Each structure stands twice: as C-alpha cells, then as structure tokens.
Image (cartoon, helix red, strand yellow):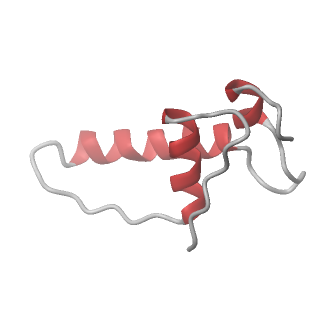
C-alpha cells in the first residue's frame, strides 16, 4: 500500500503470519527498556535484523511513498 499515512503503514499486516512494523517496534522498545533497566551504567552493543531497522526508520523518518531498502 503506497498511499497509507504513517500510522496505517506501521499497523499494516503485509502477511497474516508476519508482525506489523508497530508490533516489531513494541517488542523492540520493550527489549531496549529491559537493557536500560539492567545495564543502565554500562555500554551495550545491540545488533538487529533489517526488519527492525526498517520499522525504526519508518517510525522516526516516515515519508509517504518512500520505502527503506536495507539488506540483511
């Protein structure tokens, strides 16, 4: 769907068996909060799958009809 606004795009289910970008972000932010709570005063390295990075970029820098291409 090319003409969706940001909220509709983030909530769109591209396939019934795959999380929406909003669902990915919910899991990601919960994970980051857990790391922050546990390792507040330490350095932490986080690696990610391209799908998580795309979700974050669409959340932060959404432009209608623009799609991020990030290889794994």
Residue 29 placement (x, y as % from top left): 46, 39
> Which residue in the rendered view is the most extreme toward the left?
41
Residue 18 placement (x, y as % from top left): 79, 55
Q: Reply above or below: 52 against 36.
A: below
> Which residue in the rendered view is the most extreme toward the bottom?
72
The front one of 70 and 12 is 70
Relative to 62, 41 lies left or right? left
Q: Quadrant of the N terminus?
A: top right
Q: Reply above or below: 69 against 66.
A: below
Residue 56 placement (x, y as % from top left): 51, 44
Residue 59 placement (x, y as % from top left): 55, 35
Asked which quadrant contains residue 12, the reply is top right
Q: Reply above or below: 64 against 36.
A: above
Asked which quadrant contains residue 51, the reply is bottom right
The front one of 23 and 4 is 4
Going 43% across and 47% down the picture, which residue do you hit? 31
Going 11% across and 52% down the picture, which residue do you hit? 42
Q: Quadrant of the C terminus?
A: bottom right
């Amino acid at each position: 769907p090319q003409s969706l606004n940001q909220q509709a795009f983030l909530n769109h289910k591209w396939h019934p068996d795959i999380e929406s970008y909003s669902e990915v972000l919910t899991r990601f932010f919960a994970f980051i909060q857990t790391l922050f709570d546990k390792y507040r005063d330490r350095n932490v390295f986080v690696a990610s799958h391209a799908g998580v990075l795309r979700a974050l970029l669409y959340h932060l820098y959404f432009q209608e009809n623009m799609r991020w291409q990030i290889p794994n």
